[in-house]
Amino acid sequence: MEIKHLVHMANQIADFFKSYPEAEAIEGVATHIRQFWDPRMRAQLAKHFEAGGDGLNAISLAAAKRLLQKASTP
């Protein structure tokens, strides 16, 4: 899948949660991606985030960071 499509999808999810308090929005996006995205999609998002996350909005960036942190926690 093209990264621009994944970025668009992540930002759409973040837009849904934008009326929530920031911490809840970030956790909501991270949870949605963890539960519903294919592992390959999550890996592409992680790689994109590590390369700077161009195009991701603030909530999507924070959610991607949270996903990476949880993935590296034993």
Image: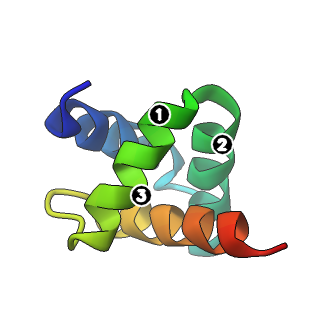
| Front-lying residue, 67 or 29 | 67
- The kind of secondary structure element at disc 1 is helix
Chain-order first, disc 3 or disc 2: 2
Q: Mark 1, residues whose alpha carbon is within 10 Å: few (<14), some, or many (≥20)?
A: few
Q: Is residue 63 above or below residue 39?
A: below
Amino acid under disc 1: Arg
Q: Position of residue 66 (x, y in %)?
A: 59, 70
Amino acid under disc 3: Ala
Query: Which residue shows up at 55% across the image and 27% down it?
Result: 38
| Label 3 sits on residue | 46
Q: Is residue 10 above or below residue 25?
A: above
Q: What's the coloring here?
A: rainbow
Query: Which residue shows up at 30% across the image and 36% down it?
Result: 6
Query: Which residue shows up at 67% across the image and 60% down it?
Result: 27
Q: Position of residue 52 (x, y in %)?
A: 21, 73
In which quadrant of the rendered image does the C terminus lie? Answer: bottom right
* 36 left or right of 9 in image: right
Q: Is residue 45 above or below residue 1?
A: below
Q: Position of residue 60 (x, y in %)?
A: 40, 59
In which quadrant of the rendered image does the N terminus lie? Answer: top left
Amino acid under disc 2: Arg
Count of numbered circles on the image: 3
| Label 1 sits on residue | 40
Q: Mark 3, residues whose alpha carbon is within 10 Å: few (<14), some, or many (≥20)?
A: some
Query: Which residue shows up at 77% across the image and 75% down it?
Result: 73
* 46 left or right of 57 in image: right
Distance of label 3 from label 2 (alpha carbons)? 12 Å
| Label 2 sits on residue | 34
* 54 left or right of 41 in image: left
Tag 2 near tag 1, CB within 8 Å? no
